[in-house]
Amino acid sequence: MKAGQALIDSTCELVVSNRRLLEISHVQIASSRRLLNPWGGISGGSEDDSLDAVASDLYDQVRARLHRRSLPSAPKLVFAGRATVQRACIVCRRRIRPGAMQHESVAEDRTKTWTHTLCLRIWVDATVGLRSEEPPADTDHIPARSPKRSR
């Protein structure tokens, strides 16, 4: 009887471990999804909104970091290529593995940063969204044009 209970306990532990690994895999898939080719995703199975939730959470985090200025605005020029060494993504703070797509940008102070494809897209979208919410600069000091008078 003890051997049967030990087998059940071992199976329960493995199920919990597999669920945790599956959740981690879903996050990694979401962060590695190529936005330029939507047909490259995983097909089959049921519709799962958890990947969209991960991207939405990251978007919210990026907006908050942009508001706090702990993350600079997204760069305007980016170089894309395969990573040759392991780097840290400035957006999600996770590693970019060698062989994975990475996006490199150089700031005005010549510091280099690297991002995943999905992270770069979210960073750019959040930056553009925040810029569109800002009021135009110094509109109070622009003199109003007077209508032309006819002679």
Image (tube, rainbow, N blue to C red):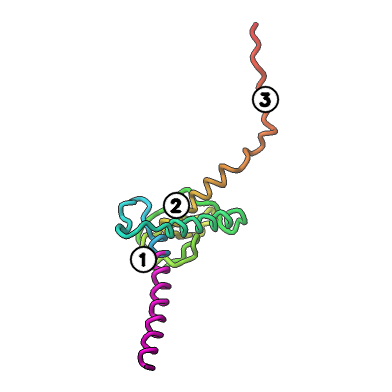
Q: Tell me which numbered mark, 2 or 1, is placed earlier along the sequence.
A: 1
Q: Amino acid at mark 1?
A: Thr
Query: Circle 3 is placed at which residue position?
Result: 144
Q: Residue at x 65, y 6 (%)?
A: 151
- Which sits in the foreground, 101 or 17? 17
Give the secondary structure at mark 3: loop
Quadrant in the rendering for residue 64: bottom right
Q: Tell me which numbered mark, 3 or 1, is placed earlier along the sequence.
A: 1
The answer, for residue 107, to whether it is visible in the render is: yes
The residue carrying pointer 2 sits among few (fewer than 14), some (14 to 19) or many (20 or more) residues within 10 Å by Cα, namely some
Query: Circle 2 is placed at which residue position?
Result: 121
Q: Amino acid at mark 3?
A: Ala
The CA span between labels 2 and 1 is: 21 Å
Give the secondary structure at mark 2: helix
Query: Circle 1 is placed at which residue position?
Result: 84
- Relative to 22, residue 34 above or below: above
- Measured as percent of width and height from the top left, residue 1 is found at 37, 93
- Measured as percent of width and height from the top left, residue 133 is found at 59, 43
Quadrant in the rendering for residue 10: bottom left
The residue carrying pointer 1 sits among few (fewer than 14), some (14 to 19) or many (20 or more) residues within 10 Å by Cα, namely few
Q: Tell me which numbered mark, 3 or 2, is placed earlier along the sequence.
A: 2
- Which sits in the foreground, 112 or 22? 22
Q: Residue at x 36, y 89 (%)?
A: 4
Q: Residue at x 35, y 61 (%)?
A: 82
